Amino acid sequence: MSAPNAHLADSLVPGRHEPLGAQARDGGVNFAVFSEHATRIELCVFDAAGQRELRRYALQGPVDGVFCGFLPGAGAGLVYGLRAHGPHAPHEGHRFNAHKLLLDPYAREIVGRFAWRAEHHGYPLGHPDGPQALDECDNALHALKARVAEPLARPGPRASAPRHALPDVVLYEVNVKGFSMQHPGIPEALRGSYAALAHPAAIAHFKALGVTTVSLLPVHYAIDEPHLAETGLRNYWGYNTLGFFCPDPRLASAALRSDPAAVTAEFRGMVQALHEAGLEVVLDVVYNHTPEGNQYGPTLSLRGLDQASYYRLAEDDPARLENLSACGNTLNVRHPRVTQLVLDSLRYWVEEMGVDGFRFDLAPVLGRTRHGYDPQASFFTALRQDPVLNSVHLIAEPWDAGDHGYQLGRFPGRFLEWNDKFRDAVRGYWLADQLGSAARVGRGEFARRFSASSDMFHHGQRPPCASVNFIAVHDGYTLNDLLSYAHKHNEANGEDNRDGRDGELSANFGVEGASDDAAVSQARERVRRAMLATLLLAQGTPMLNAGDELANSQGGNNNAYCQDSPIGWLDWSQPQRESLSAFVGRLLQLRRAEPLLRHARWFVPPGQGSAGDASIHWLRPDGHEMQLHDWHDAGQRAFACLLRLAGDAAAPQLALLFNPEPQAQAFCLGDAPAWTVLLDSSGTLAVPAQDLTPGLPFDVPARSLLLLRASSLNPRH
């Protein structure tokens, strides 16, 4: 970069009110900042190190809430911050404090290292009036600052993006750092970085599994919460976004972390490499809260620019912030300019950084109006009409921390939704003999979730793939641990094991933690593979938790958000890693090969439907059709289903047999065709693959799922 501060102009000239943020153009830099309630906003220019303020300029305006100005002669590399003047009236929701240097919310590059210091707060810590008081200590020396970015090189990684049809999508949720920190095939200098995720060894793993879409835990610029900083821990998951346009430098290669431009380039290179391998990239994004917290939190950016516009205020007391995120504050996405901020950020990550979609953390926040959650809220309308965003993946975490926050099945249009009912049904079904009666799941609930949860999603033209099926994700036990621990073990988090979800459905099969008891190990492995088969062969969109294909353990920690350590990193040394990964690869190979396992339409009743439709037919183990009383028979759990194309004359094409019992179960599929065994999740079926004769019973191994394909009967030899 050239020396951006060499000849700073004496004053700003009139600038453009769009785009918001800082843009190098026309021989200078244009600045535009929104604040509905500020009386004046100042642009503060610093030296390249961000240590010394060189000039201060008053932006012009406001016009329609936007302050702007053009600095001639400046360019990329200019380091700056903002100061906002306005009323300090906490009882009205206003906390303007011009003594605090503010980060531009549109910053493309962020410089400096953040540390929690008293002067970042807009009130004196310990003052008897608390956050009602005004702190006059200047924080500029230690504040994070924005740096004007060079225009990004074209074409970007979006130009080579693959596009997988929704019924074909298989998600792989992964933490950028944790994936590679202990990966033996990735060079040490790259481990934990964006570049590591694009390394040939990583791509080979994704391709061998057969996943289509890598869903990354948050990669936006984030800072650690103060209680973590005090204990030496960090927010490893990254759900504490401060920079909505910046990749987090902590996830870049060590040699590049101090240069925001190099960090951006590495992220774009990762997306490019994954795209060239046919893999999509989805980002987990946090537009529900910021690190500024509640009224006792710091003044870093949005609070100082215009708290009453950017955050939701408590209706009965505007001095307090509404807390629908359980993180202290809630972004006010119902405000048009906050909607614009979110949409501008999303477009940036698609157009400039190349990503293929988003998973929205605590997504009901985005649809909350003054009257509660509304699927037709203005944000959703704007998102679905946006010419850039209307073609990328949209995935909702369909709950937040507010009243009536559970909104599964109520997101509009093309949204896919995390389906926790699938998670609980699969766990409760396969672990029923290990759980108390209240937690056990019967055949009816399991069948409903296995066939894409029509009670939740079969409305408003939504397809079966709207259900994102999962058994384990970053938040909670790993698959290995839900089969190894009956109780959470979060002591390393420093909260006396009080954090994390209590009562998570899990079982230890008689031994808490790792075990060398052969019977315990066999039972766990049987259920692990049956659960994986259920996940990857069910209707809907499967999502695999990274590491579950490795038997990865977190030692029973079900809230490893602060464990940037071997607890939270994937363990590639598990002895069953290769065989388990190969099993997952086989399951996804079957899913690709058998369209009925990823049917794009809802199943119709047997004998009904038209071309392109298919039906599912449920059977008892004896081959008779399931009746109403069978669905409610708590003493019987094994059953089967037949999948066939629509039409009276159509013969069954696939059969799935479920036996969660701890002993083998006799099945008979009646007078159906002969069957070829495509998959036995237990790996122990004794009969030859072509020897399942119509009308004859056969034993399905304990704790197993079988997938069969109809075939012509082979003669016996």
Image (cartoon, helix red, strand yellow):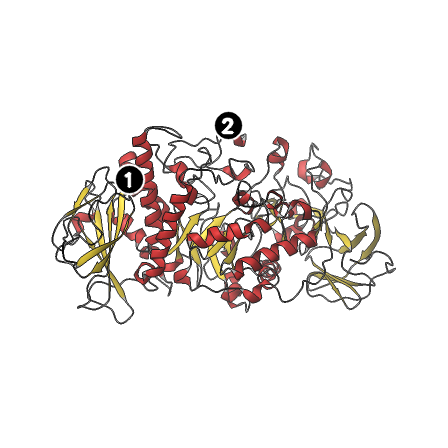
Q: The N terminus is located in which quarter? A: bottom right
Left or right side of 365 for 117: right
Q: In the shown orientation, is residue 435 left or right of residue 378?
A: left
- Which three-letter amino acid code belongs to the residue tagged 1? Arg
Q: CA distance from mark 2 to mark 1?
A: 29 Å
Q: Is residue 97 left or right of residue 175?
A: right
Residue at image location 37% in from the left, 32% down from the top? 486
- Which residue is drawn at the image coordinates 51% and 35% (left, top)? 567
Q: Alpha-carbon neighbours of circle 2 within 10 Å: few (<14), some, or many (≥20)?
A: few
Q: Nearer the viewer, residue 24 or 462?
A: 24
Residue type pointed to by label 2 = Asp
SS assignment at label 1: loop
Asked if marks 2 and 1 touch (Cβ < 8 Å), the reply is no
CA neighbours of label 1 inside 10 A, class few (<14), some (14 to 19), many (20+): many
Judge from the rendering whether residue 3 lies leftward or rightward of residue 427; answer left or right.
right
Q: Quadrant of residue 327?
A: top right
Does any portion of residue 406 appear in the rendered image? no
Residue on which disc 1 sits: 440
Residue at image coords 18%, 61%:
712
The mark tally for this picture is 2
Comparing 302 with 198, the one in front is 198
Residue 341 sits above or below residue 295 on the image: below
N-term mark: 2 or 1: 1
User: Residue 466 location in percent, x, y?
Assistant: 39, 58
Nearer to the camera, 325 or 147? 147
Q: Quadrant of residue 136?
A: top right
x, y percentage for residue 237? Answer: 54, 43
Q: Nearer the viewer, residue 46 or 674?
A: 674
Percent across and percent down for residue 525 are: 33, 39
* Above/below status of 317 relative to 459: above
* Camera sees residue 639: yes
Q: Which residue is mark 2?
A: 496
